[in-house]
Image (spheres, grey):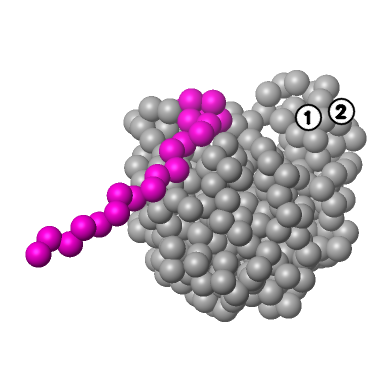
Amino acid sequence: MIKETLPKRIRPPAVASMFYPGNAEELRNTVRSYLHDADTEQNSFQLNNEENSKLRTLIVPHAGYSYSGKIAAFAFRLLQNNQPQFKRVLLLGPAHRVWLQGAAFPAADVFETPLGGIKLDKVRMQRLTENYPWISVNDTAHAEEHSLEVQLPFLQETLADFELLPLVVGETKTEQLAEMIQQFSEDPETLIVVSTDLSHFHDYQTAQQKDALTANAIELLAAQNLSPEDACGAFPLRGALAAASKNQWQVHRLGLCNSGDTSGDYGRVVGYGAWALTT
């Protein structure tokens, strides 16, 4: 008897050739170049194995690679050098395209990029939607969302094999999201990745001042001090920081800049930062 299997539902890339190269070879070379450059930075952060410090969460920006790829690479380089244990990634980012109350997983089985398909952890996704009423299944929230997608090629290049739990986060209560994230905080095989940019469309100097305050709040795990005006991913960021505070994790700044530094346009800039949270 031949067992019939349903065709896999695939979420195709929405911002390939816009936020990052659409050609597989060019994309792979671009990501590897960013990672190589990050690895050769003189002051690049290293985990202290003697203190048994373990990587648990990354906070990364989500602009086009020409704007924020360098900063994102500092985080993914650290992952590349400390990744054997990770079998899945809980990836959280804000909703830019739709208004969303709560958070949403997609109905898709696979997220595709020019580098290939990434299998979704449907078992855990279903369990979470059953246990948390504020988590829905909403393909519309994912269809054109770039905050998660731009992280995928970096993950594909730095993790050998992994399953993905992609969660678009809208308006959520910090304590609810922190409770959900806490489940994964206790799982050494799960990496938590939070996608967020910082301030938007201020002049260069104002952005530097605002982003310095936001960076300080992140490094103090002061989730309550962050608003969507400080970081577009404030909702997922607050949940992750609240969980990290409960676990007494350490925060390490990996990089901080804005689009003026990478584009040369200092008039209306967007802030970018990367952090690692460790045990």
Percent across and percent down for residue 208 are 84, 39
Instruction: Give the Cα distance between marks 2 and 1.
Output: 6 Å
Residue closest to the eye, 68 or 114: 114
The answer to whether residue 43 is seen in the rendering is no
Secondary structure, mark 2, is: loop
* Left or right for 238, reference 133: right
Residue drawn at (78%, 47%) of the image: 231
In the picture, the quarter occupied by the C terminus is bottom right
In the displayed structure, 176 sits above or below 67; it is below
Mark 1: amino acid? Val
Q: Place residue 269 in its image quadrant.
A: top right
Q: Main secondary structure of the magenta part?
A: loop
Residue drawn at (35%, 42%) of the image: 116
Q: How many marks?
A: 2
Instruction: Identify residue for label 2.
Output: 203
Contact, mark 2 vs mark 1 (Cβ under 8 Å): yes
Residue closest to the eye, 278 or 2: 2
Query: Nearer the N terminus, badge 2 or badge 1?
Result: 2
In the picture, the quarter occupied by the N terminus is bottom left
Percent across and percent down for residue 239 are 72, 64
* Left or right for 274, reference 198: left
Residue drawn at (52%, 52%) of the image: 106
Instruction: Identify residue for label 1.
Output: 269
What stretch of residues is rendered in magenta?
1-21
Percent across and percent down for residue 37 are 51, 39
Mark 2: amino acid? Asp
In the displayed orientation, state which residue is furthest to the front: 1
Q: Is residue 241 magenta?
A: no
